[in-house]
């Protein structure tokens, strides 16, 4: 009898150990996973020759809606002038959206046609397109545009998301351990989550989607220079408001190295592309850093922390949720720093309605804890998004601009998503600094159109939504 009890107890312990291993080990390996080699990158301080601010704006004048879009045109112009190489790293590159509710320009096909035309014009040109698996709806089948590119000798590199750290570890750890082995399947039978004109998907594609991983970069590099942007050549994003920096010179070399690293861990070594620049004609009193992943956060926090009374911060952001950045903005306001924030109201997403999380809750916290010393306005969208991601820090003698693909959220800048930003440090009276100030003032003051509204327009500090936002930001169980 005693022997049977001992055997039963031993069996129960063994089962408990197995169950514990099944539950705990995937989480441990998920949380301890390192970022891929070459990511989390900060370039040395570098020079540039040309440096321009680009932006897209959708706004109203009277009863008319104006779409002032320039970034895609500049990208296509760069492609048309390239002779040696083109490397593009683009998050959203597809024509899927809710066609029953909206009609957008064919931005994805325009970009695709430009690449193909240049490859046909310059047969020896090297062209690589790095992208995210979202564009294939998390299936193994390339989308229409990627097939066209490959048919014309252009290599499409789908980022290996399995190498990216888990922003949603509670799910992604178990997916990696137990679900991914079932593959992604073939033909689908379920509605595409990204638009009614997208291909049908299956359950395994949805299971892959729930990892919430992304190569979120928006980069274009040619032998002439580079554009680092917040915009995507995606039909449903055609009318978004965005910013971009266009530049040439030494900094482009470092940006190219950061992109080669993504291609390398995704299975492709880009060895036949080098950027060469003219060392004369360097832009005076200008320092540029190429920043990716958590190095973006480090510089943002550093710049905010080093502000003092009399300085000013202007922030334009699609998603603001990062706890430490919010805390540092409040502390800066307490020191007497003037802070102006323009946020998307998080109500529009490609024909679908959103609930305002996280921006409305983050804005309410800023207003309350800073005792009204932080000013917040909402960008008025009409189905599109205020997709800008940029911060300007105006100090006594210099201005710092940081902008690109990265939202200010845990997923974007805590070394999970792949992101790319440019940081520009220049004299306070630099024409680019003044141009950005004119741009931001235009939105803030509604000059020559209606862009923004008072904080009260979308104020929302409901306890339930605050709790949802805080849990989602902490755990990664969200799309922001």
Image (cartoon, grey):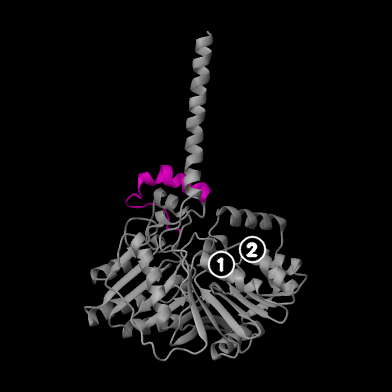
Residue at figure coordinates x 47%, y 89% from the top left: 283
Q: Position of residue 294 (x, y in %)?
A: 52, 64
* Disc 2 element: helix
User: In the rendered structure, which segment of residues is drawn in magenta?
Assistant: 169-193
**Whether residue 186 is situated above or below residue 229 in the rendered picture:** above
Q: Is residue 264 magenta?
A: no
Q: Are marks 2 and 1 in contact (CB under 8 Å)?
A: yes
Q: Is residue 227 visible?
A: yes
Q: Position of residue 68 (x, y in %)?
A: 50, 84
Q: Is residue 172 magenta?
A: yes
Per the image, the residue denoted by label 2 is 324
Mark 1 nearby-residue class (10 Å; few <14, some 14–19, many ≥20): many
Q: Nearer the viewer, residue 253 or 441?
A: 253
Per the image, the residue denoted by label 1 is 297
Q: Is residue 459 visible?
A: no
Residue at figure coordinates x 27%, y 75% from the top left: 126
Q: Assign the C terminus to one quadrant of the image.
A: bottom right
């Amino acid at each position: 009898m005693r022997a049977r009890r001992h055997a039963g107890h031993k069996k129960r312990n063994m089962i408990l150990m197995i169950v514990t291993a099944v539950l705990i080990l995937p989480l441990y390996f998920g949380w301890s996973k390192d970022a891929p080699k070459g990511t989390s990158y900060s370039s040395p301080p570098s020079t540039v020759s040309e440096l321009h601010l680009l932006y897209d704006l959708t706004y109203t004048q009277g009863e008319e809606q104006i779409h002032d879009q320039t970034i895609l045109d500049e990208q296509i112009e760069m492609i048309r002038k390239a002779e040696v190489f083109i490397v593009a790293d683009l998050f959203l590159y597809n024509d899927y959206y809710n066609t029953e509710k909206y009609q957008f320009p064919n931005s994805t096909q325009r970009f695709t046609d430009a690449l193909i035309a240049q490859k046909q014009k310059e047969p020896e040109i090297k062209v690589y397109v790095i992208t995210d698996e979202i564009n294939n709806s998390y299936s193994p089948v390339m989308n229409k545009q990627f097939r066209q590119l490959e048919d014309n000798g252009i290599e499409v590199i789908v980022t290996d998301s399995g190498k990216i750290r888990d922003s949603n570890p509670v799910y992604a750890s178990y997916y990696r351990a137990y679900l991914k082995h079932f593959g992604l399947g073939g033909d689908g039978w379920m509605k595409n989550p990204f638009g009614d004109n997208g291909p049908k998907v299956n359950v395994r594609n949805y299971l892959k989607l729930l990892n919430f991983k992304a190569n979120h970069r928006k980069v274009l590099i040619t032998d002439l220079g580079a554009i680092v942007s917040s915009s995507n050549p995606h039909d449903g994003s055609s009318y978004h408001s965005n910013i971009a920096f266009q530049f040439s010179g030494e900094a482009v070399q470092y940006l190219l190295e950061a992109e080669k690293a993504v291609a390398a861990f995704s299975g492709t070594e880009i060895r036949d592309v080098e950027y060469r620049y003219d060392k004369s004609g360097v832009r005076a009193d200008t320092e540029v850093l190429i920043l990716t992943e958590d190095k973006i956060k480090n510089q943002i926090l550093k710049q905010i922390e080093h502000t003092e009374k009399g300085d000013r911060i202007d922030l334009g952001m699609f998603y603001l949720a990062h706890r430490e950045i919010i805390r540092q903005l409040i502390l800066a306001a307490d020191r007497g720093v003037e802070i102006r924030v323009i946020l998307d109201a998080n109500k529009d997403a490609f024909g679908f309605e959103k609930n305002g999380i996280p921006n409305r809750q983050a804005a309410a916290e800023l207003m309350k804890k800073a005792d009204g010393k932080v000013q917040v306005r909402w960008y008025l969208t009409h189905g599109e998004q205020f997709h800008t991601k940029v911060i300007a820090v105006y100090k006594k003698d210099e201005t710092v601009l940081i902008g690109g693909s990265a939202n200010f959220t845990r997923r974007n800048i805590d070394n999970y998503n792949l992101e790319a930003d440019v940081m520009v440090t220049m004299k306070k009276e630099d024409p680019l600094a003044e141009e950005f100030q004119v741009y931001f003032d235009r939105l803030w003051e509604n000059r020559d159109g209606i862009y923004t509204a008072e904080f009260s327009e979308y104020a929302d500090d409901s306890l339930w939504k605050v709790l949802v936002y805080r849990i989602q930001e902490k755990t990664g169980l969200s799309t922001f």
